[in-house]
Amino acid sequence: MIVTAATFAAVLFASQLRRKRKEGSILLGSNGFTKQWKNAQGYDIFSYFWPTAVDKPKGILLLLHGHGVYVVFEFLKSRGVGLERVYEGSWIEELNKQGYSCCGIDAQSKGRSSGYKQMRTMFDSFDDLVNDDLDFVSKLPELGGEKFSNLPIFPFAMSMGGARAAMMILRNEALFKAALFYAPMLSLERVSKQGLNPYLKPLITAISLIGPHWRLAAAATNDIYPDLQAEFDNDVLSDNGMTRVRVASEYLRVTTHIMENLEKITLPFVTFHSDGDTMVDPDGSRRLVQVYEAATLPHTLPLLLLLLLFSL
């Protein structure tokens, strides 16, 4: 039997198509889909949509991932080291069942999105990330369709995603009904004291101008759950390298701004944070609650819940 090059190419293409469809169903479930769009800087931004199938949707969860990772790694269910995470059994699947559509973008230079000079985990300004998030919110009806239109929006933010959410709220709180924070990056005081960071902090602005892409800032590792650290280290779309100087400088700038403006966050929220967090400072969550309570308790019952999990 003679197999021509064209026949072989067709068979190979069909095989790749079946594999991609299978991978898509694993990541997206039966109703999910992805869209790619260009931001104001010309970067390709990859977005994910998991619409609820219920007749009367309750709202939209805006998924905001953390540093070095991306939406799929942050919000879908783990299958172990070297395996991409899956929709089945994930928070997203359960939220869909409860009537919430879920969506999010891989922030520029992370995951499947392109970014600054094609570097991984590199941006010129944190404001660029926030601009992309706000643009995405404005594009939801266009990109997501009916299940992402005319419904209350709730940021669901993890780690660095918490800073993205806080900055969006500070810019335009009216866009959102309430917010859910999970170990949000609101303060970096504790992290800035680790490794070489205390020596770099006073110089970071100057170094950022000289070598913004240099990787100098220490990145904490997950010693409490080494299996999760191994999964992160072996994920091809995650970035486990040291933090670039410009990125670290921007993180310090934006968290300082957030901590100085906590009283302006007045929408209802829930925050979950472990006191043993070595990645971001749990005092950021604690202070957010204290400021909120001081502002709201004299007038009304607080519409929030704080869970600080000690002794982890």
Image: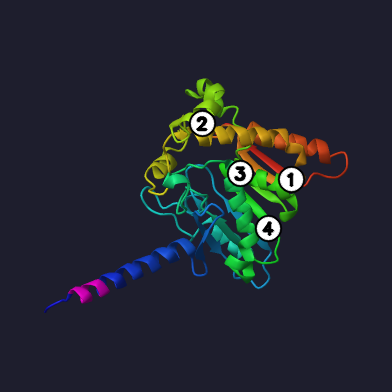
Q: Nearer the viewer, mark 4 or mark 1?
A: 4
Mark earlier in primary sequence (2, 1) = 2
Q: Residue furthest top?
A: 199
Q: Nearer the viewer, mark 2 or mark 4?
A: 2
Colour scheme of this structure image?
rainbow
Q: Nearer the viewer, mark 3 or mark 4?
A: 3
Q: Residue furthest bottom?
A: 1
- Label 4 and label 1: CA atoms lie apart by 17 Å
272 versus 194 height, above or below: below
The disc labelled 2 sits on which kind of residue? Leu
* Quadrant of image for the N terminus: bottom left
Mark earlier in primary sequence (4, 1) = 4
**In x, y percent, where is residue 302?**
80, 44
- Label 2 and label 4: CA atoms lie apart by 37 Å
Residue holding disc 3:
127
Q: Nearer the viewer, residue 161 or 56?
A: 161
Q: Is residue 220 magenta?
A: no
Left or right: 234 with respect to 181? left
Left or right: 153 with respect to 229? right
Left or right: 193 with respect to 59? left
What segment is highlighted magenta in the picture?
Answer: 5-10
Residue holding disc 4:
153
Q: Residues within 10 Å of mark 4 (few under 14, many from 20)?
A: many
The disc labelled 4 sits on which kind of residue? Ile
The disc labelled 1 sits on which kind of residue? Leu
Residue drawn 77% across the image and 45% down it: 266
- Label 2 and label 1: CA atoms lie apart by 41 Å
Residue holding disc 1:
304
45 versus 165 height, above or below: below
Residue drawn 31% across the image and 73% down it: 14
Q: Which mark is residue 209?
A: 2
